[in-house]
Amino acid sequence: MDASTNDLPDAVLFDVDGTLVDSNYQHVVAWTRAFQGVGVVVPAPHLHRAVGMGGDQLVAAVAGDDVEREHGDAVREAWKTEYLALLDRVPALPGAADLLRACHERGLAVVLASSSPGDLLERHCAIIGADLVDEVVDAVTTADDVEASKPAGDLFSVAAQKVGAQRAVAVGDSPWDARSAHAAGVGVVLVRSGGFCDELLRGEAPDAPLYDDAADLLARLEGSPLT
Amino acid sequence: MDASTNDLPDAVLFDVDGTLVDSNYQHVVAWTRAFQGVGVVVPAPHLHRAVGMGGDQLVAAVAGDDVEREHGDAVREAWKTEYLALLDRVPALPGAADLLRACHERGLAVVLASSSPGDLLERHCAIIGADLVDEVVDAVTTADDVEASKPAGDLFSVAAQKVGAQRAVAVGDSPWDARSAHAAGVGVVLVRSGGFCDELLRGEAPDAPLYDDAADLLARLEGSPLT
């Protein structure tokens, strides 16, 4: 193995919401409703900016520590109920399944690393294609596997450990993915398909390459940090 | 009247969605579902960027002329049905009612100029506060009043004409408001409460002042183009 071979990644850690499934806007609407249920109004763009954090961190981040203390669990429970009611119309993002397959076929370990609870990840895998996921995904980590969700580094750290990766690269759509990857000491590639502005993405990862979506990353896989 | 007095605006033309009511994300979900109904997948961030255009222009803008020709009316009808199902949880944006009242109390003619159909504007006025709107709003224009909705200039032109304004200023949340105001020859002030990035807003109106939301504009009304 020469030096350049050593630089090649051996695993790719995929965020799911906004990266593989087009769920961020439904999450915003679900959180809007969940906060309204406890009498708290949080404007939708503030929620959008927080989507991709785990629910364990989002409530305090957008509504403050008092709301977290008094209503955190109720809001998270309501969010999940509201999101499940919207989930039937969440599609996969363009290129999601093909990108997973292409990474697998290149010999990369493929891990899904989502801030969502485990049962939601299962539903999202069904949207991407359950058979394909069974075939090409080597491991998954969810909020259930870690103490602190994104933007903490735990999810991507555990994801890399699960497949024994020496040099993993994370793929995500949000500033929280970038921050989490940085904390976990793994590389990061960002996609715009979660609706985050370039300025927000670049604020957390000035050097990370940006792609429009999974299809764009797949089309330009050669020369990307994944190959 | 001296020269500086002549520069003062005599009317303010308010966009509604994303400016006075927090509806943009619900519109994205409603459009997502409407397109799915005819078998067309449009990723949510693409829809977000188009929200604020009238429905007469949005379908072709995000899905192309063929989809508009074959399915345009069906998609618009489905969008409205889906949006009405989400509307019960759309709140007013922070400061919306107070900003309308403050403009009225300063002697400005207050006009609501929405790209939505007239019956949706009525529902949105109820969310802002029907009594307040009756008291402080001098005129309304909707998609029903013009041939081409935003980003054409017609809506803001007709809005200014309805109150005989000599120097109107539009307040909106989207690049389409900026473009429409420019086409109508009126000034524009932009708010971030529709979830559009500064780079998108500045792309259409490099010199327009940006405010976080109606509450922020109200707090800094002195020195703004509205006073």
Image: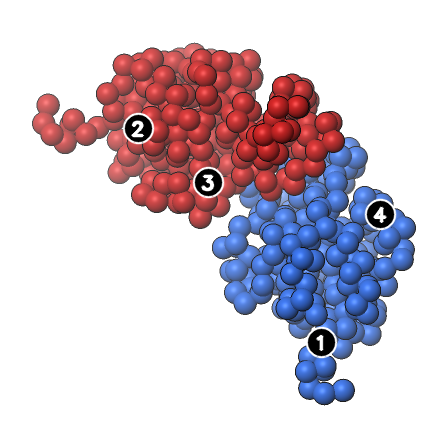
Chain colours: A blue, B red
Quadrant of the snapshot with the N terminus of chain B: top left
Q: Is residue B23 above or below residue A42?
A: above
Report which residue position mark 4 lands on: A129
Tag 1, which chain? A
Separation of residues labelled 3 and 1 (CA atoms): 41 Å
The numbered mark at residue A8 is 1
Residue B192 tag number:
3
Reply above or below: B79 against A141: above
Instruction: Name the quadrant containing residue A90.
Output: top right
Residue in the foreground of this view, choosing between B91 and A209: A209
Q: Which residue is mark 2?
A: B186
Category of crowding for the residue at label 1, using alpha-carbon neighbours closer than 10 angstroms: few (below 14), some (14–19), many (at least 20): some
Question: Is disc 4 surrounded by few (<14), some (14 to 19) or many (20+) residues within 10 Å?
Answer: some
Q: CA distance from mark 2 to mark 1?
A: 56 Å
Q: CA distance from mark 2 to mark 4?
A: 51 Å
Q: Position of residue B4 (x, y in %)?
A: 14, 31
| Residue B77 visible in rendering | yes
In this orientation, which residue lies closer to the viewer: A88 or B225? Answer: A88
